[in-house]
């Protein structure tokens, strides 16, 4: 059977999601009752099932067993992984061939490893590759290297590229371990010991957090094997588990590289996809249909986005909490976990962040409290003005959006979702690098400090926002206009959303590449600067307007030309070093105001040499 990474990942994910254990019968007061029984963290647990649930659960258990058997057979057939390791290694003519089948996990090396790496030949490298390469070639710190991030952000590709760049001599001293569900840290330790005894000096361990005892026992990787001179690179999608192990077990004995955030400049350079609107639609992963890394378009539809939130984010958090301190860090989320509702609630929190973003675009101007940005712009459209959004039932529309977000109906929720649950989940989303809060400041200065939550994967936000906007089609008033007008209005609304998202992207990327500087929105009693970059060390600032337009018009820079606003900003933040409009047109200067193309601006942020 040929090696199939996609099938292995599918089987691994399916096994994790399906129930384990077995169904047992207990007779209580003369009545037979059915229970699901399983072992978790060394403790036996059971759950009562009614007859219908027992039949369904038993079918799922049998399906899990079928997948486990298929995975076992697939892994045992991998070239260089089990039976033909000896033949593979004889091609290198060294003594490691004598070890036979003593590995307890899936280990690739020799020609099998070379074939594994060759699948990325010709792909461009992410910027983070330089840090990984430096560790493998130069680092002498006796630390392990942790390469982590959400799914489809290029982790395994980075590993393959590192392997592909090795000389034949270095490759003969390198192994790749694929950890699967059911593997333990003890089995991994046994294989590392065997690899060390046979002279392997570089070991890549993928999905290491699938080993249930990894968080508690990760220190052995640095304290024993890295201390002996072995270079160990850990990777996996369980980002939160790495954060936990990095703050405790591995502490100062690891180098951590997070792959989740993919800036525009990398999206364009690595995937050869040009344009801010393409980044808004698909940015956030190294996936685009038919383009390089993956054949899947991760955020093509709302269901695609939902699947990603569920598998890459919600279950990431739940898996990490389950094994961190033996499940003792669930805090206020413990009851939700016990009731099997935690994943659902995490999904709702992620969607609610986007829900509030969409509602803000459609129904509220941040300063003027106008009924809606889109309604205002449609009213004053120069070519085809319309008041259709004034006539829809905005209250019913908003309520419809809220209802659309309910993953579990309220009558199905056994635990009421409180603000403390949302706050803790948001804390984990921040640790995953998925959400970032951008501040809004006010002049005159007020005691309030507001934040706009930005989702670092724009494609995810766009897919969900697009689905929410489609709820407009259900409004009676809106359905009564022509299909042509409906389509034109929906396109205009999506342009408004793309414009707001472009603002968020610029704010986020500027913040991430401006250490020592403060990046924020600045609001006045009337009007605002879309972005201010304050440099406290040099007592100066830069003022920006951000427009989704591809043409320069006078109204775009009216705030930048407002002497009173500029004087207030200069008094508060220092000398104004730059005034600019970031838009989708060409670079130029008009009336003392710079017009900067958005793609050019983003590519110059944190500019590095091509790899």
Image (cartoon, helix red, strand yellow):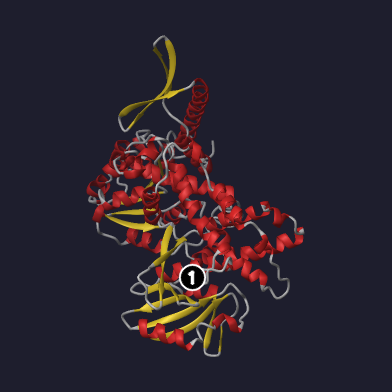
Residue 212 x %, y %: 34, 38
Secondary element type, mark 1:
helix
Quarter of the image for residue 551 reads bottom right
Q: 85 or 365: which is nearer to us?
A: 365
Relative placement, left or right, of 270 versus 44 is: right
Residue furthest bottom in the image: 591
Residue 4 x %, y %: 53, 41
Relative placement, left or right, of 243 versus 344 is: left
Q: To which residue does mark 1 refer?
A: 506
Whether residue 286 is visible to the viewer of this picture, yes or no, is no
Above or below, comparing residue 233 to residue 127 in the picture: above
Q: Quadrant of the C terminus?
A: bottom left
Residue 373 x %, y %: 58, 68
The residue sitting at 51% across, 43% down in the picture is: 5
Q: 476 or 486: which is nearer to us?
A: 476
Residue 377 x %, y %: 63, 71
Quarter of the image for residue 479 reads bottom right
| Count of numbered tags | 1
Residue furthest top in the image: 30
Q: Quadrant of the N terminus?
A: top right
Q: 515 or 162: which is nearer to us?
A: 515
Whether residue 605 is visible to the viewer of this picture, yes or no, is yes
Above or below, comparing residue 179 to residue 379 in the picture: above
The residue sitting at 59% across, 82% down in the picture is: 555
Task: Answer few, some or many: residues within 10 Å of disc 1's Cα (few below 14, many 20 plus, some between 14 and 19).
Answer: many
């Amino acid at each position: 059977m040929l090696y199939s990474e996609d099938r292995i990942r599918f089987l691994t994910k399916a096994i994790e999601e399906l129930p384990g254990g077995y169904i047992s019968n207990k007779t209580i007061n003369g009545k037979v009752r059915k229970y699901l029984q399983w072992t978790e963290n060394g403790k036996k647990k059971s759950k009562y099932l009614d007859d219908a649930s027992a039949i369904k659960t038993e079918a799922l258990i049998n399906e899990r067993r079928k997948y486990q058997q298929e995975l076992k057979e697939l892994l045992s057939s991998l070239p260089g992984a089990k039976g033909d390791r000896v033949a593979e290694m004889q091609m290198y003519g060294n003594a490691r061939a004598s070890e036979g089948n003593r590995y307890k996990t899936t280990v690739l090396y020799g020609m099998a490893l070379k074939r594994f790496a060759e699948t990325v030949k010709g792909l461009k490298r992410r910027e983070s590759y330089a840090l990984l390469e430096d560790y493998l070639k130069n680092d002498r710190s006796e630390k392990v290297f942790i390469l982590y991030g959400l799914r489809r952000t290029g982790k395994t590709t980075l590993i393959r590229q590192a392997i592909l760049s090795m000389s034949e001599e270095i490759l003969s001293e390198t192994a790749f371990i694929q950890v699967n569900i059911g593997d333990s840290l003890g089995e991994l330790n046994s294989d590392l010991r065997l690899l060390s005894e046979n002279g392997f000096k570089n070991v890549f361990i993928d999905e290491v957090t699938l080993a249930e005892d990894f968080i508690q026992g990760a220190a052995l990787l640095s304290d024993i094997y890295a201390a002996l001179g072995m270079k160990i690179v850990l990777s996996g999608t369980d980002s939160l588990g790495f954060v936990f192990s990095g703050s405790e077990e591995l502490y100062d004995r690891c180098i951590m590289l997070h792959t989740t955030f993919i800036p525009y400049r990398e999206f364009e350079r690595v995937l050869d996809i040009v344009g801010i609107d393409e980044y808004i639609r698909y940015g956030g992963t190294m996936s685009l249909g038919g383009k390089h890394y993956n054949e899947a378009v991760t955020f093509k539809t709302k269901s695609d986005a939902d699947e990603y939130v569920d598998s890459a984010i919600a279950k990431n958090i739940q898996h990490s909490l389950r094994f961190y301190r033996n499940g003792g860090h669930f805090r206020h989320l413990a009851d939700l976990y016990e009731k099997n509702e935690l994943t659902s609630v995490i999904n709702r929190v992620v969607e609610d962040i986007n829900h509030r973003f969409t509602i803000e675009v459609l129904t509220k101007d941040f300063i003027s409290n106008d009924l809606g940005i889109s309604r205002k712009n449609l009213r004053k459209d120069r070519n085809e003005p319309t008041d259709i959004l004034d006539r829809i039932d905005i209250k019913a529309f908003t309520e419809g959006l809220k209802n659309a977000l309910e993953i579990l109906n309220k009558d199905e929720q056994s635990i009421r979702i409180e603000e403390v649950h949302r706050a803790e989940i948001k804390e984990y989303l921040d640790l995953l690098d998925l959400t970032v809060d951008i501040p809004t400041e006010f002049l005159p200065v007020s005691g309030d400090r507001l934040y706009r939550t930005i989702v670092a994967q724009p494609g995810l936000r766009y897919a969900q926002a697009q689905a929410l906007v489609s709820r407009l089609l259900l409004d009676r008033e809106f359905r009564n206009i022509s299909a042509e007008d409906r389509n034109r209005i929906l396109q205009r609304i999506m342009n408004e959303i793309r414009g707001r998202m472009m603002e968020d992207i610029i704010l986020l990327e500027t913040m991430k590449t401006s250490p020592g500087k403060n990046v924020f929105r600045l609001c006045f009693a009337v009007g605002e600067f879309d972005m201010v970059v304050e440099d406290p060390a040099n007592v100066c600032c830069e003022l920006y307007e951000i427009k989704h337009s591809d043409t320069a018009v006078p109204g775009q820079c009216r705030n930048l030309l407002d002497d009173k606003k500029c004087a207030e900003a200069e008094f508060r933040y220092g000398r104004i070093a730059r005034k600019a409009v970031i838009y989708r047109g060409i670079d130029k200067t008009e009336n003392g105001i710079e017009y900067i193309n958005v793609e050019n601006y983003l590519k110059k942020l944190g500019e590095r040499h091509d790899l």
